[in-house]
Amino acid sequence: MGPFAPGAEPGEGPAVGAPMVDVVDACAPPMTCFQLPDVVRCAEHGLGGRCPQCSEQLVQNIPLPVYSTFCRVYSSLPWDALGSQRCTLSASSSSSRSTLSPPPSWQSVELSFPAFVALAAGLAPEPGERLLHLGSGSGQAVVAWSLLFPLAAASGVEGCPTLHRAASAAVARLDPDLQRRIHLHHCDPFGVQSDWHQAGVILVSAAGFDDDAMDRVLEGLQAVEQGTRVVTLSRPLPCQLPSRSPPGFALARQAACRTTGLNNASVFIYRKLPIR
């Protein structure tokens, strides 16, 4: 069973995604009280206002024990040291097009927990659907996915050893049944492109990428199954068409989401189209 409530209050996200917890009985756990500023940061108005940046953003609350578990496993990480980490990949593994451009960086960009919850609810994953996070940083999205969707697995690929160790330490604090559904890999995400198709939702941290690196991402996504949702953080998939979507993909939504660094990241959500 998943954690999303079957009835959303005004201003909150719809009840979508994997099978949801029935929270209407008297024994239901308390819920979080996430608000819009937890999901998107905006200085254009007061707490009760809305602007074009956040007017379409949703807030989704979940059972408080789920959030408490997430906070517990990440409570002792050295956030000041982790926030500036990035993995610069070697030119041999990551820059096949040009020897003049520097290799791309899988920069650590992770969404805040409330922002990721809202994103996950909007993706409406099927029961058991796998998440793959390329450039998974300290593993927060991977851990959150496993907590939100108890039937689903999640994989993270991170090239920075410091961030990979932090993710592994966080996962080690989870219950064994959760640990079995989480797979962390310390390697070049481009080196495992042949495995990307195994996920139904692919999250790409692209903050440190140049145009050549984004072209490589798009190439790696050609083999994914139709219906796969691809979420890119900070940069869109390359496209020369007025539709703003590369061939074979449809841009479903663009939004700003709050990051763990308290700024916003641009989030682009695509769906892989059927082959014609």
Image (cartoon, rainbow, N blue to C red):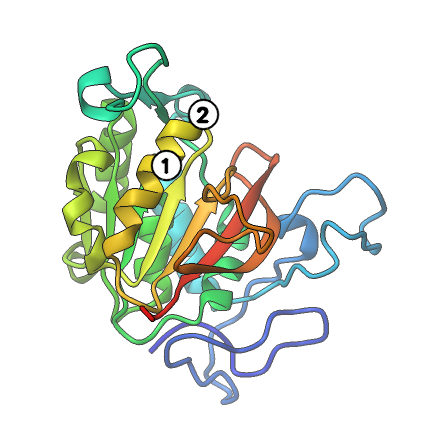
Observer-side mark, 2 or 1, equals 1
The answer to whether residue 147 is left or right of residue 16 is left
Residue 169 placement (x, y as % from top left): 23, 37
Residue pointed to by mark 2 = 83
Q: Residue at x 49, y 83 (%)?
A: 23
Q: Residue at x 30, y 29 (%)?
A: 163
Question: Viewer-proximal residue, 104 or 51?
Answer: 104
Q: Residue at x 28, y 12 (%)?
A: 99
Quadrant (top left, top right, bottom left, bottom right) of the C terminus: bottom left
Looking at the image, is 215 positioned above or below residue 30? above
The answer to whether residue 252 is left or right of residue 218 is right
Q: Amino acid at mark 1?
A: Asp
Residue 21 placement (x, y as % from top left): 42, 80
Question: Viewer-proximal residue, 180 or 67?
Answer: 180
Question: Viewer-proximal residue, 198 or 125?
Answer: 198
Q: Secondary structure at mark 2?
A: loop
Spot the residue most to the bottom.
25
Residue pointed to by mark 1 = 215
Looking at the image, is 273 positioned above or below residue 213? below
Of the numbered discs 2 and 1, the one sitting upstream in the chain is 2
